[in-house]
Image (spheres, rainbow, N blue to C red):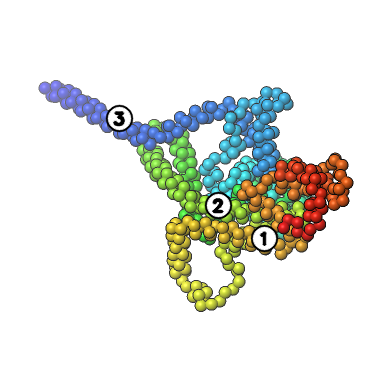
Amino acid sequence: AEATVAELTAAFDAAVAEKEAVIAEADACMRKLGLAQRLMAALGSEGERWKSTVASLQAALPILVGDALLAAAFVSYNGCFNRSFRELLTKKKFLPFLLGQVPQAKGGVPMGDDADPLKILTTDAEIASWSNEGLPTDRVSVENGAIVTNCARWPLMIDPQLQGITWIKRREEKRGLHVVRLGQKQLMPKLEDALQHGKPIVIENLQTSIDAVLAPVIGRQVKRRGRTVFVKLGDKEVDYHADFKLYLQTKLSNPHYPPEIQAECTLINFMVTEDGLEDQLLALTVLKERPDLEEQKAVLIAQMNGFKIKTKELEDGILEQLANAEGDVLENIALIENLEDSKRVSLEIADKAKVAQVTEAEINSAREMYRRVAARGSLMFFLLATLNKVHTFYHYSLSSFNAIVERAITGRRGKLVWNEEAAMSAMAPAKLKRNLADAAAEEKKRVVAETPEVLEERMAYLIDNITYCVFDATRRGLLERHKLILATQLLLKVMAKGGELIDAEAEYLVSGRSSMAPPQMTTKVQEFLSPKQWAAACALREVDAFRSLTEDLELATDAWAEWLPGERGEG
């Protein structure tokens, strides 16, 4: 009996153990099923994105060679040119050759229909980070940023307005950036420190010649001795760190460097573009006229850029966590929780981004009302930039130009004004000043919203005042014979911008062409016109409005002979 009991007890214990094992396995399966459902929910949208990414990568794979060749050519050769020449070089030279549209190409290479070097060289998140660091967002500036970050040779920035070096300083300051100039005592010690410890260094304000002691560094003439990599710096051998980065910058607008410098550096033209300057002046105008709008815009840009950067980090982080997960993914609770957090943050960012896009459209609509003012300012600066063709000592800095424009907008001359109102303003607490400024901004916003004609009148005043102030500040530094040239150029540019100018008439007025083989003058015409004047009149027949000028000169000789000697014939 005892044996039977013992046997039954053992069988019962075995059944209970089997039952508990089955229950435990069922619980594990349910837990794993729950985790699997959580994992599927966390990766649901990512799966769609991965599918589209894989499809786009598979489609891009056959054309990768051509796109990469275009990007490499862009980085190597386009940097030193302005926007028009970059487009000409890319669309008229590179693309026809790579697509096999010229005989020398011998068939070309596969390329995408909308091949764009920027799509190969950078991403939206990277462009957003550059914007946060102070790089302007116009197309040329973004291209410059892509070239700086991708070029194999050291970048040499043509940067008269200091936009490039300002961006580099903010970009590299967290890595311990050194900023030096040729001739400084600290040049060699700081360069040696940067070489040994992998720090970035900027040599600013270069002229057309560079010290020969820097040639091994600029030319990357590194040598190896065992595992040690070094470069010769003067009479010393300095360890060469792989993270070392050298930036060269010049304020010269049209420098002429020897071939060896151009071969060993990547020249990048950071000169301000008309579109880029227009955006900067728009920000300045709105800041002074509607500080509330510009503050919202600045916050919104930083927020949108942060969204792009964070979204990219989350997407990369999800892939990294999945790739580095050990063992069964469904048993890695920490991984699934991290993925759920990433998913939650990603959805929050997507919702905020939609709201931000609506807000951005509203702010841009309000800011665009001031676009005409910024366009006139940009036109004025680039007019001044051409005056060095009239005389080499006419050069104008962007910072001084911005100061003149700001003074034209605010109406302040920068002189000390001391009265009761000024004294009370100076002694007012900071909080009170902010409240007064906010109240003034709200009042201006209310007036503009209620009376659009007031805004239109204000725009006309700002355009006229900026034009006058810039012209007045410039003409004081001009030779007397050059003032009329500036005034004429200003008039022609303003009329051309407004579509009020006929190109053929303006071209004749500026160039003053003469006919190389004019017909013979009649005797009566010879009495009041010289051969040179007759040749110019014959050339003027190419302009539609003056097509019958020579015939009229021959037919109405008495009227022309009476009109020509007058001092103010146009009156």
Give the residue pinned by disc 3.
Answer: 29
Decide which of tag 3 and tag 2 comes sooner along the chain: 3
Give the residue pinned by disc 1.
Answer: 471
Badge 3 amino acid: Cys
Residue 371: mark: 2
Position of residue 431 measured from the top left corner of the image (x, y, whole percent): 44, 68
Label pair 2/1, CB-CB below 8 angstroms: no
Badge 2 amino acid: Arg
Q: Secondary structure at mark 1?
A: helix
Mark yes or no: residue 357 visible. yes
Mark 2: few/some/many CA within 10 Å (<14, 14-19, 20+): some
Quarter holding the N terminus? top left
Quarter holding the C terminus? bottom right
The front one of 440 and 398 is: 440
Badge 1 amino acid: Phe
Of discs 3 and 2, which sits in the foreground? 2
Label pair 3/2, CB-CB below 8 angstroms: no
**Residue drawn at 68 percent across, 29 percent down:** 97
Decide which of tag 3 and tag 1 comes sooner along the chain: 3
Mark 3: few/some/many CA within 10 Å (<14, 14-19, 20+): few
The total number of labels drawn is 3
Position of residue 70 measured from the top left corner of the image (x, y, whole percent): 64, 34
Q: Secondary structure at mark 2?
A: helix
> As drawn, is 541 to the left or to the right of 101?
right
The front one of 34 and 497 is: 497
